[in-house]
Image (cartoon, rainbow, N blue to C red):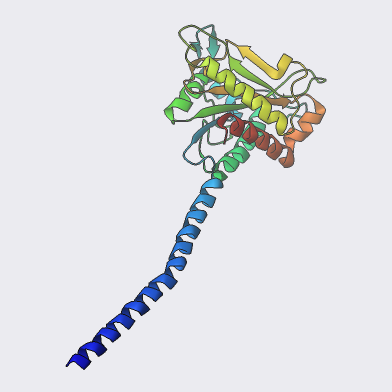
Amino acid sequence: MRSLKAIAAVAMCALVTITSNTASAQSPVLSQSSVSTTAVTQSAASTKPLAGLVIAIDPGHQLGNGQRKFAKHINEKRFNGRIWKICNTTGTATNSGFPESTFTWRVALVLKAKLERLGATVRMTRTANSVNLWGPCTWDRGTFGKRVGARLMIQIHADGAPRSAYGFHIITPALTRGWTDGIWKRDLVLAKAMKTGLIKGGLKPSTYIKGAISIRGDQTAMNLAKVPTVTVELGNMRNPSEAARMQSAKGQSGYASALLTGIRAYLNR
């Protein structure tokens, strides 16, 4: 009997040893798997630096704003804290007739795709570019950012200055008591970040707006905005060199990339 007990004890001891060794051998494998999963998660997060953010894009004037049938809507006026201004305008165009609305729309679409690839949710003030549509009114554009929960809003435009002038400039609101009190300083921070980003993105600052930042009190959308908002005039559509760039797909992508650089500079992401 004692002999059987001894044999059983030895067998049990051997089983414990084998189990212990097996667990010890598996432990590094489990640990490596955990490390790998963590690394993949961290890697995914690092490639989506704008995840969780809502960015608002305003592509500006609608293509149909010049249609006579929409004149009543376009010419409606509202007070913006400084002056009475109409709903919207047609925008400008190149000397060959390429419209600002189409340029800004195409740039906005490219920018939207770039932001979404970085994890951002993008909301746009207009979802089409058509001669059969009008607006959006500046007062609707101004309140859009807050309505969609955006961290910031970029209004994309192009200027119609004299032929020899070129370069981008950024419009940001002045202090208007009762209207921009709580936001104008944040707008200015955004404007400066966008200027830095646009230069890094390869765009040249304006030759006709000192410092490439224009502080104005007459802009309805920005006077109504409750999230940091600026208007970026990407260039002069009447300048032949800039007009050619604005009409090309490569140029439009370049403008979008520069805007993205500015946005990321502001967000520090």
Residue beneath the point at 19% across and 91% down: 2
Image location (x, y in percent) of residue 179: 47, 11
Image location (x, y in percent) of residue 188: 59, 18
Q: Quadrant of residue 269?
A: top right
Toward the viewer: 101 or 12? 12
Image location (x, y in percent) of residue 20: 36, 74
- Say if residue 90 shows up in the picture: no
The image shows residue 101, relative to residue 169, as above or below, that is below
Q: Residue furthest left?
A: 1
Q: Is residue 117 left or right of residue 164?
A: left
Q: Where is the N terminus found, in terms of image quarters?
A: bottom left
Toward the viewer: 257 or 90? 257
Residue beneath the point at 52% across and 23% down: 228
The image shows residue 154, relative to residue 53, as above or below, that is above
The image shows residue 127, relative to residue 1, as above or below, that is above
Q: Is residue 214 left or right of residue 7?
A: right
Q: Is residue 160 left or right of residue 90?
A: right
Q: Quadrant of residue 6?
A: bottom left
